[in-house]
Image: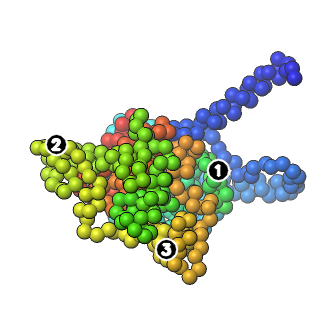
Amino acid sequence: MKFSSSSKIFYWLGMFIIFSVIVSSGCGGSSSNFYYPDTQDVTSGDQDVVSDDQQQEQEQEQQQESSSLTFDPSNYTTGTVNGVSYRAYSNIVYVANPVNSSYQQLSIYIPETYFSGGTLNGYTAETAPIFMPNNVGGYMKGGISSPDGRNSSSLSTALSKGLVVVSAALRGRDTDYGTAPACIVDYKAAVRYLRYNKNNLPAGNTDKIISSGTSAGGAISALLGATGNSSDYNTWLNELGAANASDDIFASMCYCPITNLDNADMAYEWVFGGDSGISATLKSNFVSYVNNLGLKNGSTSLTLNSDGSGSFKQYIESVYLKSAQDAINSGETVNVSWITMSGNNAVSADLDAYSASFTSRQKNAPAFDQLDMGSAENNEFGDKHFTEFAYNNSTASNPLMADSAIIKAMNPMNYIGSANTAKYWRIRHGTKDRDTVLAIPAILALKLSENGCNVDFASPWDTGHGGDYDLDELFSWIDSICK
C-alpha cells in the first residue's frame, strides 16, 4: 500500500503520540497537566446512545460537582507555631460524593508570609512544595492533624521550612466502607483535589507534592507514590466524585512500610521462621519469589539459594552493616552479637544471628494473612484472605478470598514501571523493627532504583517501629530534591 505525503505525516504523528504515551510511565514520567475524564473505555460493538436530555443532565451534574470541589480562599483562620504565622483552610470535603464526609476532608496550612510576596527558606508562594503526610496506622482511619495539635511535629517543622502542608483524613478498616482500597483511593482523591485547584490555591506547587506516612501509613505513602494516574483506581475514584485531575506525586517518604502484603508472610519466615511446617514452606516460597523478581544492586544480581543463602541475603546484611558503621561514626556504641567488630569498624553482619538475638518472634506464622483470618490485615481486606497459601490452608470455618483487583491495588510493586511513579523516594526501616522484615522495604527500594527512581534507603540503628524521628534529615532531603 502506498501513502500520500499527507498520509505519511499523520502516520508518523500518530506513532510519535503512541511513543510519548509509552515513555511517560515510570519514575518521574508524570504530567500534572494530563487529566483523566470520567469516561469509560470504548469497546467494540454497539454503544448506548445518549439523548440530548441525558447529556444535559450529565453536564449539570458535572457542573455541580465542579462547583462543590472549587477551593474557597476566603474561608480561613490563622495561627502561629514555631514562630511561623499561617493560614488554615480547614475541613474541606475533597470529593463530590463522600461516603463518609468526616473522613474525606482535608485541611491546608500556608505560611502567612506568602500572602505578602515573602519568602521562607528560599521558597515563594509559587515554588513552595506541598507536604502531605497521612495519619493512617494499622490500616485504621487517619484523621486531620493541625500544626499546633497532637502528632504535629512534622507539620509544624514543615511550615517552619517554608512548605505548604496538607493534612487529609483517610478512611480505614474501622470506618464504614473503609476496607481496602479505601485508604489509597481517598489519598489519591485528595491529591486530585489539590491538582484540580492548582490555580485557586494561594500557595503551593502542585507539581511538588510529597507524601509521608508510618507503618500502614508508610505503605499508603508508597502506594500513592507508585501508582500515579493508574486507571485501576478510576472506578473507585469516579464513584466518590473525585476531581477530574491527575494523582501522581513528586516524592514519597515511607517509614517502616507494612507493604507488599501478599508476599510479606514469606519474607517474615525467611528471617524469623523455622525449618518445619508452615514456616518452612513459606521460607522456601520466598526463595522463588525473590529469584523471580530479577533484582539487582547496581550490576550485581540478587538471588537466593534453596537454603535461603545467597547474594540477596548478603545485600540485606550489608544494609545492617552500614547502619552499624554509621552509628559508630556518629559516636554511638555498637555491641550486639550479630555485628563483628574490629576496633571501631563494623566488618560483618550475620542475619541468622540477628534473628536469633531476639528472645521471641513478634508474630506467629503466617504473620499477616493469618489462617483464621484474624489479623488486622485480614480485616483490612474485609475479613478475607489475600494470599493463596493462607486460603488453601485456612482454618476459618468459612474461608473467603479477597478480590484479586483489590489485592493488586494494595501492592505498590505491581505498578512500578507502568504507572507515573514518583521520581524521589526516602524509605526507612529500623534495625529493631520486627513488625515486618527489612527485606520487604529493601525489595521496594531495589525495584524503584532499577526503574530509574532516586531512592534514599537506610535502616537507622537501634530504631524500632515508628516514624518522624529524623525530621531535620527528612526536610534536608526535601530541600535537596526541590531546590
Residue closest to the eye, 429 or 30 = 429
Mark 1 crowd level (few <14, some 14–19, many ≥20, 10 Å Cα) = few
Three-letter amino acid code at the position of disc 1: Ser
Question: Residue at 15% across / 54% down in the picture?
Answer: 335
Q: Residue furthest left?
A: 343
| 3 vs 1, front mark | 3
| Distance from the alpha carbon under mark 2 to that under mark 1 | 50 Å
Three-letter amino acid code at the position of disc 2: Asn
- The quarter of the picture where residue 54 lies is bottom right
Question: Residue at 44% across / 59% down in the picture?
Answer: 284
Left or right of residue 320: residue 174: right
Three-letter amino acid code at the position of disc 3: Leu
| Distance from the alpha carbon under mark 2 to that under mark 3 | 44 Å
Image position of 275 with respect to 417: above or below: below
| Disc 3, SS | loop
Residue closest to the eye, 431 or 473 = 431
Residue 99, numbered circle: none
Residue placed under numbered mark 2 in the picture? 345
Q: Position of residue 143 (x, y in %)?
A: 45, 65
Visible in this render: residue 3? yes
Residue placed under numbered mark 1 in the picture? 231
- The quarter of the picture where residue 135 lies is bottom left
Residue closest to the eye, 468 or 429 = 429
Q: Disc 3, disc 1: CB below 8 Å?
A: no
Question: Residue at 25% across / 65% down in the picture?
Answer: 358
